Image (cartoon, rainbow, N blue to C red):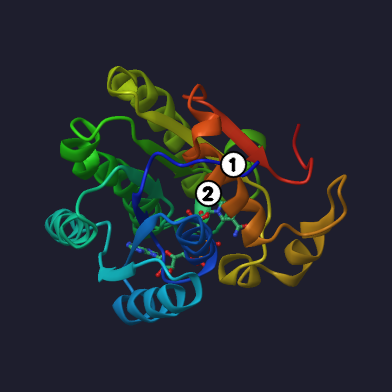
Amino acid sequence: MSAKYSVSKAIITGGAQGLGAVIGERLASEGISVSLLDMNETGAKETAEKLTASTGTPVYGFKCDVTDRAQLREAWQAAADAMGGLDTYIGNAGITRDKMFHKLTDDDWDLVIKVNLTGVFEGLRASAPWLRTEGAGRVVLISSVVAKMGNLGQMNYIAAKAGVVGLVRSGATELARFGTTVNGIRPGFIETAMTKAMPEAAQAKMAENPLGRAGQPEDIAGAVAYLCSDDAAFVTGHIVDVNGGLDM
Ligand SMILES: NC(=O)c1ccc[n+]([C@@H]2O[C@H](COP(=O)([O-])OP(=O)(O)OC[C@H]3O[C@@H](n4cnc5c(N)ncnc54)[C@H](O)[C@@H]3O)[C@@H](O)[C@H]2O)c1
């Protein structure tokens, strides 16, 4: 028996490439209309075009820098207009600016918090008019395994990703009355452009988990699809670890 989805209109931030694009592919292949929002407008539109062709479901691409509140709200409205509403928000856009904490510049700290924490919150806030009126919806926010286990040289990133866990729990509490679930995912190391930028020694460690392989974007997309499905209707405020057993 295949999974059922009561939701049908999803915004994914950071959807031009990496996890966001593969999550978009998976949701569209389940018949959910998708809007990919990304600061890389060309990438968002090209990926949307490809996914529309490969899945047969409408996928749209819009320019949206999540640190620009006005642009984010405009992009949200444009996406909802294109899809005929909005019932699902996947907060995925994220960046790294890794350094040992005493070497972090003001910009390294400010930008990572702005994109990875404030940007995720702004997406939730922009979704509120729809999530509070369209009936049971779905929110999935992307945190990170390092929010749980810590890591060298990522204090800015880890602070933001731990903050995302707070958004999940408070969001789940506030949106429960509308039947909307809010969950998070803590990916382990997944092969994308973000991890390819890591030092080689760090990349070599990516497969050092009990399952003995690096994670793939499809591993994360599968968990998102589950959390968006009717099978997860009674799951809220939960953080799913998808990390090959790296941290249990
Ligand atoms: N890859 C991993 O191992 C891993 C592990 C844990 C968590 N994550 C998280 O998963 C998410 C996706 O990561 P990824 O590996 O696909 O990275 P990626 O670098 O491949 O893709 C990130 C996307 O976000 C977009 N983006 C960056 N800043 C933005 C902004 N200000 N506004 C809008 N879009 C913006 C980029 O243009 C890009 O398309 C991130 O939040 C990341 O922190 C990744």
User: In which quarter of the view is residue 6 placed?
Assistant: top left
Label 2 and label 1: CA atoms lie apart by 22 Å
Q: Amino acid at mark 2?
A: Phe
Q: Residue at x 67, y 53 (%)?
A: 219
Q: For the residue labelled by badge 2, is the local secondary structure a helix, a strand or a loop? A: helix
Query: Do we see residue 165 in this rendering?
Result: yes
Q: Residue at x 30, y 42 (%)?
A: 87
Instruction: Estimate the x, y position of residue 183 in percent, counting from the top left.
Output: 47, 33
**In the rendered image of this protein, does residue 4 appear above or below residue 119?**
above
Query: Which mark lies nearer to you, 2 or 1?
Result: 1
- Image quarter in which the N terminus is found: top right
Most foreground residue, 135 or 169: 135
What residue sits right under mark 1 in the picture? 186
Instruction: Estimate the x, y position of residue 61 in percent, counting from the top left.
Output: 30, 71
Mark 1: C-beta under 8 Å from nearest atom of ligand 1: yes
User: In which quarter of the view is residue 48 placed?
Assistant: bottom left
Q: Residue at x 49, y 49 (%)?
A: 157
Question: Crowding at label 2, few (<14), some or many (≥20) Cα neighbours within 10 Å?
Answer: some
Looking at the image, tell me whether mark 2 or mark 1 is earlier in sequence order.
2
Query: Do we see residue 153 in this rendering?
Result: no
Most foreground residue, 135 or 116: 135
- Image quarter in which the C terminus is found: top right
Q: For the residue labelled by badge 1, is the local secondary structure a helix, a strand or a loop? A: strand
Numbered mark located on residue 101 in the image: 2
Count of all numbered marks drawn on residues in the image: 2
Numbered mark located on residue 167 in the image: none
Instruction: Estimate the x, y position of residue 24 in percent, counting from the top left.
Output: 46, 61
Instruction: Estimate the x, y position of residue 83 in percent, counting from the top left.
Output: 24, 58
